[in-house]
């Protein structure tokens, strides 16, 4: 009898393990939750490299986009400011995982007149992005690319975050999950 109990415990343990694994593979909210746990480790903290000097940074092609009110903007008109650009979508688990930290950083720095924030939503429709932001109570503005997205800014992987210096040059490009809501990153962003 005791042998049968151990066999059943082993099978039950395997079923639970593989069940949880399946949930994390299929469920977007579960994947996002798991990725948020990884963010807390500090391993996914992007850094604005100081090794790059002003002369080695490349000029970014201008990105034109429109806001929720249909007003067009361009990163070209943001020269003189540090520009934080984040490409995201509501169906992307890494985007969802990093969004709480991105939103918190935005709340803390949005009134800093030396920094501009651009959050390009790449959902099929702006309604999907707006619904996601409302559901999660995020404050970041919903912005959509006007047409062409320069490949030096976005190569097709989500999420992608770009930092432009005050002259419109690429100071940082990070593809994948990142925790931007750290004291070190915010200090680097402000200092840039």
Image (cartoon, grey):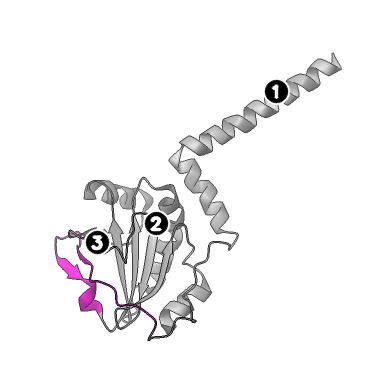
Query: Residue 11 bears which disc, if any?
Result: 1
Q: Is residue 84 left or right of residue 26?
A: left
Residue in the foreground of this view, choosing between 170 and 22: 170
Alpha-carbon neighbours of circle 2 within 10 Å: few (<14), some, or many (≥20)? many
Q: Quadrant of residue 145?
A: bottom left
Q: Kindly state the secondary structure of the residue where label 1 is placed.
A: helix
Distance from label 2 to label 1 (Cα)? 38 Å
Alpha-carbon neighbours of circle 3 within 10 Å: few (<14), some, or many (≥20)? some
Residue drawn at point x = 74 percent, y = 24 percent:
9
Start-end of magenta stretch: 56-78
> Depth-wise, is mark 1 or mark 3 nearer the camera?
3
Check contact, mark 2 vs mark 1: CB within 8 A. no
Task: Write down the residue under mark 2.
Answer: 159
Residue drawn at point x = 29 percent, y = 55 percent:
121
Q: Does residue 138 lie above or below 6 as drawn?
A: below
> Depth-wise, is mark 3 or mark 2 nearer the camera?
3
In the rendering, at what x and y percent does residue 96 appear? 42, 51
Q: Does residue 36 lie above or below 74 as drawn?
A: above
Q: Quadrant of residue 58?
A: bottom left
Q: Kindly state the secondary structure of the residue where label 2 is placed.
A: loop
Tag 2 or tag 3, which sits nearer the N-term?
Answer: 3
Residue drawn at point x = 24 percent, y = 73 percent:
75
Alpha-carbon neighbours of circle 1 within 10 Å: few (<14), some, or many (≥20)? few
Distance from label 1 to label 3 (Cα)? 51 Å
């Amino acid at each position: 009898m005791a042998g049968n109990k151990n066999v059943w415990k082993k099978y039950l343990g395997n079923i639970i393990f593989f069940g949880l694994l399946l949930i994390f593979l299929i469920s977007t909210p579960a994947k996002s939750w798991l990725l948020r746990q990884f963010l807390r480790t500090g391993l996914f903290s992007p850094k604005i490299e100081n090794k790059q000097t002003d002369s080695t940074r490349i000029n970014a092609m201008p990105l034109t986009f429109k806001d929720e009110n249909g007003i067009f903007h361009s990163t070209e008109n943001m020269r003189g400011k540090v520009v934080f650009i984040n490409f995201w979508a509501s169906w992307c688990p890494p985007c969802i995982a990093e969004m709480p930290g991105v939103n918190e950083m935005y709340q803390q720095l949005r009134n800093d007149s030396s920094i501009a924030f651009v959050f390009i939503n790449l959902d099929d429709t702006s309604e999907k992005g707006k619904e996601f932001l409302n559901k999660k109570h995020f404050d970041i503005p919903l912005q959509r690319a006007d047409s062409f997205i320069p490949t030096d800014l976005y190569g097709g992987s989500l999420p992608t975050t770009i930092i432009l210096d005050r002259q419109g040059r690429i100071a940082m490009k990070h593809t994948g999950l990142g925790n931007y809501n750290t004291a070190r990153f915010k200090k680097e962003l402000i200092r840039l």
